[in-house]
Image: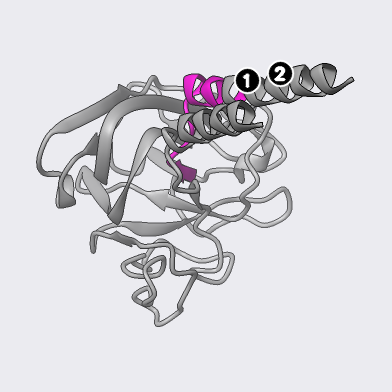
Amino acid sequence: MIRVAKLVAVAALACTGVSAQAAVSLNFEQITPHPSDSTVSILEFYNGGTASNGVSGPNVGVSFAANAKARCLNTATVRCPLPKPMPEPSRDNQGGAKSRKGGLSTPDPSTFANVGTGFSDALAFYYVLGDGSTGDVSVFSGLNGSGTLLGQLTLAPNAVGCLPELAELCPFQRAAFSFSGVAHSVVFAGTLDQIAFDDVTLGVPEPANWALMIIGFGVTGAALRRRRAAFA
């Protein structure tokens, strides 16, 4: 029985080697009424504070630069009063995001989000980028896009337009990349009015980490089965 207990402990240690932080998802809804323009700054909406319009959101420890705006997204029945209309990403061509009506607009030509407690493993998001435009997403070890560059993904233009939203910048497409280390900020860059992001997920476990967890539990199960056989 002691041997089994040791094997269980080994499996538990293997699992604790995986990042324990739960993934944080940002869908940019409820920041501003729909439909609306892109004048609301996200600010501390996800950090226990409020957006520039005084609306508060969930406290997940994420704050945005002042130039990060909530973007109105077209639905099948309601159009946003913005140039370069964009659709809700629930109609994208890669399975569909869960968010509707709201996204992140990238001006100036970049903005950033700070994650005070940090996150690891990977970053996933949906994006749409106009033809002939540029965009990329980077993660850094420090706040405000400072410190060591831990990972970066250059985005390919993907906008082809779609109905029934009558959206020119469409469809949203999923993208993700993994990195090593702990990131404390994410920089979103792209051509003004030609790019938007939605359903940003911080800290997606890498497949290798999931495999490590499965192996750990497998070792435990095998040991218990052998122990039961010995008793029989």
Residue 54, quarter of the rendered image: bottom left
Residue 217, quarter of the rendered image: top right
Q: Under tag 2, what secondary structure?
A: helix
Q: Relative to residue 227, is residue 65 depicted above or below?
A: below
Q: Relative to residue 69, is residue 168 depicted above or below?
A: above
The amino acid at mark 1 is Val
Query: Does residue 135 appear in this view?
Result: no
Q: Whole-percent x and y of residue 65?
A: 24, 59
Q: Relative to residue 136, is residue 195 depicted above or below?
A: below
At 26% from the left and 27% from the top, the residue drawn is 151
* Residue highlighted by disc 2: 222
What colour scheme has been applied to the protein in the rendered image?
A: one colour
* Residue highlighted by disc 1: 219
The amino acid at mark 2 is Ala
At 57% from the left and 29% from the top, the residue drawn is 161
Q: Is residue 48 left or right of residue 164?
A: left
Magenta segment boundaries in residue numbering = 198-214
| Residue 203 is inside the magenta segment | yes
Q: Is residue 134 left or right of residue 89?
A: left
Q: Residues within 10 Å of mark 2 (few under 14, many from 20)?
A: few
| Residue 96 is inside the magenta segment | no
Look at the numbered discs 1 and 2 and tell me whether their residues touch, using CB distance below 8 Å.
Answer: yes
Q: Under tag 1, what secondary structure?
A: helix
Image quarter where the N terminus lies is: top right
Q: Whole-percent x and y of residue 196?
A: 42, 42
| Alpha-carbon span between mark 1 and mark 2 | 5 Å
At 25% from the left and 49% from the top, the residue drawn is 112
Q: Nearer the viewer, residue 115 or 93?
A: 115
